[in-house]
Image: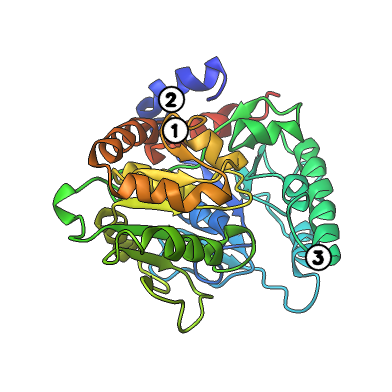
């Protein structure tokens, strides 16, 4: 996952955390309070865990504060057009000299002058990779520009981290891979909570690269004729009012409700065209749920190239779901493999790796 020094530090994480608390500034345009983007959720989890370990954390964001958050919040909202680029401009004017660490999850590409002792940048995916799959000329151009900003940010930072190995295709000089983390205390198996009827869970958007609509169509075409009682539950904000037979839109869920939805389902499916990592895959696996995914970059990494989940092309999605819903032994096999793989994404280990990076990051 990471080089030998980071592995050694992870084993000594308790001692590392006890050395001295750090003052950490995190940059994240996104937070769960204002966006469904996965990066914001990961930043929220990481900041919360770091505060629990005794550090002071302030998150600088365009989104409003997350209700009940234990970390500080610095509002840097930038309304209007080209918001992310103007957010980066405003970041450049901030005085960060009171912090020990700047940990950026985006928009730090103009911070080339040293402002803190350690500047860490996490690249959560590749905008170049996403540009290959996104529709619309304007959106593709925007992704390409953001891709160049990721390259520049990797040069500006003391240490750059990618969340999956394939992201290094676009940043080959980056050697450190630290995955996104999942709270194993919240996302955990509970066989007694499984629904009485075959249930597939989806977390994402109806349109665009998450391809919820295509999943619903495939479910209705291939699963419902054989299993008419089956349900497709969709944690989704943009689904139509009537998504069709067998499809139940759950809308936006609280953290506890989402964990319950994972435990209730029989199979998890996210047929995304692109994921830099794919946090829902890891959450599902940690919950003891077999995963079906299309072979995007993140899904391939999280499922260990299909060893811990089923990777299928889009046209085989319905058949793969039907096969799993009707084969208890295969569901159990994939759930067991997924649970073992999910331990590699435990949030506690991820935080320990970052703590080590914070303390040694100035030494490139």
Q: In this view, does 308 lie to the left or right of 274?
A: left
Disc 3 or disc 2, which is closer to the eye?
3
**Which residue sits at x=38%, y=68%?**
68
Question: Does any portion of residue 52 appear in the rendered image?
Answer: no
Badges 3 and 2: C-beta atoms under 8 Å apart?
no
Q: Which of marks 3 and 2 is nearer the N terminus?
A: 2
- In the rendered image, the residue lying farthest to the front is 225
Q: Is residue 8 above or below residue 60?
A: above
Q: Distance between the residues labelled 3 and 1?
A: 40 Å
**Which residue sits at x=46%, y=22%?**
9
Callout 2 secondary element? helix
Q: Is residue 209 left or right of residue 139?
A: left
Which label sits on residue 10?
2
Residue 249, given in percent of the width and then of the height, sits at 40, 74
Which label sits on residue 352?
1
**In-front residue for pair 82/292:** 292
**Which residue sits at x=79%, y=39%?**
156
Q: Classify the position of the C terminus by image quarter.
A: top right
Residue 279, given in percent of the width and then of the height, sits at 48, 48
Q: Distance between the residues labelled 1 and 2?
A: 5 Å
Q: Crowding near pointer 3: few (<14 within 10 Å), some, many (20+)? A: few
Q: Crowding near pointer 1: few (<14 within 10 Å), some, many (20+)? A: many
Q: Is residue 161 left or right of residue 221?
A: right
Callout 3 secondary element? loop
Which label sits on residue 136?
3
- In the rendered image, the residue lying farthest to the bottom is 241
């Amino acid at each position: 996952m990471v080089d030998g020094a980071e592995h050694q530090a992870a084993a000594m994480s308790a001692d590392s955390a006890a050395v001295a608390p750090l003052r950490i500034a995190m940059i994240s345009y996104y937070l769960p309070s204002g966006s469904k983007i996965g990066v914001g959720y990961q930043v929220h989890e990481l900041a919360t865990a770091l505060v629990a370990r005794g550090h002071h954390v302030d998150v600088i964001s365009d989104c409003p504060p997350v209700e009940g958050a234990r970390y500080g919040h610095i509002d840097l909202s930038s309304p209007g057009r080209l918001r992310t680029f103007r957010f980066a401009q405003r970041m450049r004017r901030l005085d960060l000299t009171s912090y020990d660490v700047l940990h950026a999850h985006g928009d730090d590409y103009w911070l080339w002058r040293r402002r803190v002792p350690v500047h860490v940048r996490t690249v959560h995916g590749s905008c170049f990779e996403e540009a290959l799959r996104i529709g619309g000329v304007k959106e593709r151009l925007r992704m390409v520009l953001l891709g160049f900003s990721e390259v520049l940010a990797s040069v500006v930072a003391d240490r750059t981290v990618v969340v999956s190995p394939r992201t290094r295709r676009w940043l080959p000089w980056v050697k450190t891979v630290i995955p996104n983390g999942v709270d194993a205390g919240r996302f955990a198996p509970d066989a007694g909570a499984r629904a009485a009827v075959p249930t597939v869970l989806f977390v994402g958007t109806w349109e665009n690269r998450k391809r919820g609509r295509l999943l619903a169509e495939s479910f209705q075409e291939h699963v419902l004729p054989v299993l008419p009682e089956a349900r497709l539950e969709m944690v989704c904000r943009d689904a139509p009012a009537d998504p069709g037979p067998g499809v139940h839109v759950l809308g936006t869920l609280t953290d506890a409700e989402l964990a319950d939805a994972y435990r209730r389902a029989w199979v998890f499916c996210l047929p995304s065209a692109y994921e830099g990592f794919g946090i829902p895959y890891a959450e599902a696996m940690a919950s003891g749920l077999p995963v079906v995914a299309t072979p995007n970059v993140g899904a391939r990494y999280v499922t260990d190239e299909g060893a811990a989940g089923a990777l299928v092309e889009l046209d085989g999605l319905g058949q793969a779901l039907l096969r799993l819903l009707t084969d208890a032994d295969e569901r159990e096999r994939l759930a067991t493999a997924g649970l073992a793989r999910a331990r590699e994404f435990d949030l506690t280990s991820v935080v320990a790796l970052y703590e080590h990076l914070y303390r040694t990051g100035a030494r490139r």
